[in-house]
Amino acid sequence: MCGIVGYIGARRPVPILLEGLKRLEYRGYDSAGVATMNGSDSLFVCKRAGRVRELEHALPELPPKANVGIAHTRWATHGPPSDNNSHPHLSTDERIAVVHNGIIENHSTLRTMLIAEGVNFRSETDTEVVPHLIARFYEGDLQAAVKQALGLIQGTYGLVAMCVDEPDRLVVARNGSPIVLGVGDNEMFVASDAPALIAHTRQVVYLEDGEVAVLDANGFQTTDLSDRSITKAVNELDWEIEQISLGDFEHFMLKEIHEQPRSIQRGLRGRALPEFGDAKLGGLNLDRRAFFDIRRICLIACGTSLHAAMAASYLIEELARVPCSVEIASELRYRNPIVDANTLYFSVSQSGETADTLAAMREIRRKGGIVLGVVNVVGSTIARESDGGIYIRSGPEIAVASTKAFTSQLLALTLFAIKIGRMRDLSAEAGRNLLRALAEIPEQIEHLLAEQSDHLKAIAESISSAPYVLFLGRGGNFPAALEGALKLKEVSYIQCEGFAAAEMKHGPIALIGDGTPVIFISPMDHLHEKTLSNMEEVKARGGRVIAICNPGDNEVRNVADEFIEIPATHNMLTPFLSVIPLQLIAYFAALYLNLDVDKPRNLAKSVTVE
Ligand code: AGP
């Protein structure tokens, strides 16, 4: 999930490349590097382990004058973070430079072949075979040499190549890792994600797998690997640069937690039909007849998106009265799935680029299944390859720890559940009740954030030294408990797990010792009494009960050591609210531990490799 930036035009490339890398640092941040022309007959290359700021400090005050350059920020797959393993990687004669995102799966075989031909490798990376292969085929045509090199490569790539002998162009290729071109005025940009481009242009072109583009200052030409010309549409980015700036917030994670009232309002806008207790979702590409033929729904996702899908599955089954299963994408793709014509599949993904979710979707579609996307990033691969879908409209999510995407994905799937439910047994009144409750969620989150933040900060600090934390919930709040555990572990590195509350007795209760923090989600719903019993079981073993409950719940307040009040809402919608305290607890724990909240160790924002 590396960050790639390239530039060609009349301006000096290094400032543009560095600014772009900083916008992409959430995609990977263990090392970084740049390459530009250095005069007319050599390359200037600077690369460093560490954050982009290390690279910036290593660069000379005045980098060489140039009109073309490439840059990279890395999330290591092969070889630890080091100066040598940083990109760009060079051919032996140092006349060709390449930056790459993805995995060259047959890199060992290619490395052995190239070493036998006399190549001396400088790094431990899979990527380094690429510039050596290009040089092996180079006879004065960089594009042709890149295509010949790609003919030997198995695996995934989003790559940009430059060559001293062709200083007026960049060659870009994509297979399995996102690449977007930026169209400027007499200048061109390329990046692995649009935030690197928004400061310079809103005109973007998304490359598809198997496409190669040649960029010069006047524009771009696109062909496939067989040199067939391809015409590409130019799209307009639909968000502002402010949305990828910190504003008054210290971290993107906190900013995006606080954005949820607005992101939910955006997700609702134009989609709720209170008069009919129904929802309007353009883009599903399903005719009314198709809705009647749906006998099962299957949601496919990873990570936070998996938890949003799990929470939505309770709503879909309850409202639409069709079985709804949730699949871990990485498991589904290798299980030779059984696909039937009456199952509707959804791939749920914030980035729309997660390799496992994309591969699972492709496998289902290859077997004839219909897959809709529930995606945030417009124009992303999953959005473009699905048979239709729902954009969640949560706005760019920069923090590695996903927060607003969870509530926006849950909202999109809730609206779908209402829509399909109203074509079955869901009454107009029941639909109206849900829509009314949904319409109140933004303000309820607003109040929660305003009233509970200090209290949550204190709770977060009190658990930050715990060796282990348990999150427990029932019904749709079981996935919320899973999400709370994922948030805490990924930003604070505290050992923690989420479980279905009743499941605690089947093993995890052995982990309860004196003072073990157990965070319960216990709204006053039909499962309230059961969850209360679980709290008593924890107390009886010396555990510390922290309960997320509704105002006035004296039963919980009499048992719990700490309680966090969330507003009451429709029983089916409590995960929208219960997840907010969990997000903030994770954030404040990481802050208290002085960890890098937005760039946690070992992680990257979009997992575009297996
Ligand atoms: C969640 O905080 C993580 N960043 C990660 O689990 C993420 O949700 C997962 O990789 C799925 O990403 P996607 O929604 O972009 O597909």
Image (cartoon, helix red, strand yellow):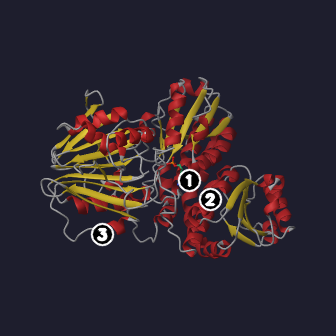
- The reply to whether residue 180 is in sight is no
Disc on res. 579: 2
Using a 10 Å C-alpha cutoff, classify the residue at mark 3 as few (fewer than 14 neighbours), some (14 to 19) or many (20 or more).
few
Q: Is mark 1 within 8 Å of ligand 1?
A: no
In the rendered image, residue 500, in percent from the top left (x then y), is placed at 75, 52
Q: Tell me the element at label 1.
A: helix
What whole-number distance in Å separates the C-alpha atoms at marks 3 and 1?
41 Å
Q: Tell me the element at label 2.
A: helix
Q: Is residue 338 above or below residue 60?
A: above
Residue type at tag 1: Thr
Disc on res. 58: 3
Return the residue nearer the eye: 236 or 73.
73
Q: Residue furthest left?
A: 40
In the rendered image, residue 506, in percent from the top left (x then y), is placed at 83, 52
Residue type at tag 3: Ala
What whole-number distance in Å separates the C-alpha atoms at marks 1 and 2?
8 Å
